[in-house]
Image (cartoon, rainbow, N blue to C red):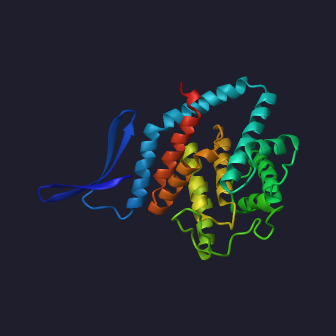
């Protein structure tokens, strides 16, 4: 977390933005001079401060991942690429659905999506939503359109049309709560301007921010708006991978077994209104996932 430090020299007071972090076994500190008074746009200053730190700490490693991934793809036959994509889609569908309450095991999900074997004595809704998510994931990666409200509504409709027709592709008109979270999503009357700002922000920042940072912020900001009655987490993770794929970075799956740290990072970012908490969590998770490209 960035803190504001005050230094008094003689009769003058000076303000600094400071952040301490661990780098390997060492502790490092970064400071940014604010001036003789705290700026009125301090939150924007904090965002720029962390953005510059990401450029120094994370961007070189993330770019190495992309370069190594690109070299690997060139050496991989098309049939093998397809097989790897299908394996990822199964794992991604299992984990993202499991985090939202699905009762299907990984084996049941794989049998369903690979061989069309419907598991016995499992809710029909879990089966249909797994199938719908798998198909939609493929569509998301293939789309040439830029994210928009219309596209998000279409994706949401595709996800829930077979199970929850009353909410499929519709912005919620009621207040919702998130189980096991202290964060309270925006009220229904706030959603239209928040969504307008979200897609305008994306159009403005998509060429400025690093793709992995952008993917993290897209995920965080969309799920924080929480525009739907259900499926906000799934939609935000789809949008995250849309951004990564669009910029030719390897995709990211957040495993169900690692959900506690994931939910914690989201909640802390949302309740403290500190986006860098989740962004740093996701970047670290991403680099751990693709450490083989950094060796």
Instruction: Determine whether 171 is above or below 116 in the image.
Output: below
Quadrant for residue 109, please give it.
Answer: top right
The residue sitting at 46% across, 40% down in the picture is 55
Instruction: Determine whether 67 is above or below 126 in the image.
Output: above
Report whether 107 appears left or right of 202. Answer: right
Query: Would you say residue 285 is visible in this rendering?
Result: yes
The residue sitting at 77% across, 41% down in the picture is 107
Task: Locate the C terminus and report the quarter of the image it occupies.
Answer: top right
From the top left corner, tell me how far across and down residue 191 is, in percent. Answer: 62, 70
The residue sitting at 19% across, 58% down in the picture is 13
Report whether 188 appears left or right of 120. Answer: left
Residue that lies at the very extreme toward the left in this rendered image: 10
Query: Would you say residue 254 is visible in this rendering?
Result: no
From the top left corner, tell me how far across and down residue 119 is, in percent. Answer: 84, 49
The residue sitting at 84% across, 61% down in the picture is 162
Q: How many marks?
A: 0
Report whether 103 appears left or right of 212. Answer: right
From the top left corner, tell me how far across and down residue 257 is, in percent. Answer: 61, 45
Instruction: Determine whether 287 is above or below 213 in the image.
Output: above
Report whether 281 appears left or right of 36. Answer: right
From the top left corner, tell me how far across and down residue 211 is, in percent. Answer: 58, 44
């Amino acid at each position: 977390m960035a803190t504001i430090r005050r230094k008094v020299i003689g009769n003058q007071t000076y303000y600094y933005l400071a952040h301490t972090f661990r780098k390997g076994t060492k502790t490092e500190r970064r400071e940014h001079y604010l001036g003789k008074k705290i700026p009125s746009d301090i939150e924007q200053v904090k965002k720029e401060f962390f953005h510059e730190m990401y450029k120094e700490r994370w961007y070189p490693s993330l770019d190495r991942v992309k370069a190594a991934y690109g070299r690997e793809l060139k050496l991989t036959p098309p049939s093998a690429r397809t097989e790897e994509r299908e394996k990822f889609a199964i794992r991604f569908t299992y984990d993202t659905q499991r985090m939202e309450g699905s009762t299907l095991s990984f084996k049941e999900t794989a049998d369903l999506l690979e061989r069309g074997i419907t598991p016995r004595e499992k809710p029909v809704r879990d089966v249909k939503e797994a199938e719908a998510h798998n198909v939609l994931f493929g569509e998301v990666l293939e789309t040439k359109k830029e994210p928009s409200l219309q596209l998000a509504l279409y994706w949401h409709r595709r996800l829930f049309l077979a199970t929850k027709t009353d909410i499929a592709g519709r912005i919620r008109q009621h207040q919702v709560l998130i189980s096991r979270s202290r964060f309270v999503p925006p009220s229904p009357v706030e959603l239209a301007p928040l969504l307008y700002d979200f897609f305008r922000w994306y159009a403005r920042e998509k060429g400025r921010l690093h793709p992995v940072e952008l993917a993290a912020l897209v995920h965080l900001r969309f799920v924080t708006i929480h525009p739907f009655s259900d499926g906000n987490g799934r939609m935000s993770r789809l949008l995250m991978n849309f951004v990564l794929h669009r910029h030719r970075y390897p995709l990211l799956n957040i495993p169900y077994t690692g959900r506690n740290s994931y939910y914690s990072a989201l909640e802390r970012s949302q309740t403290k209104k500190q986006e860098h908490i989740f962004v740093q969590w996701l970047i670290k998770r991403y680099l751990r996932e693709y450490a083989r490209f950094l060796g």
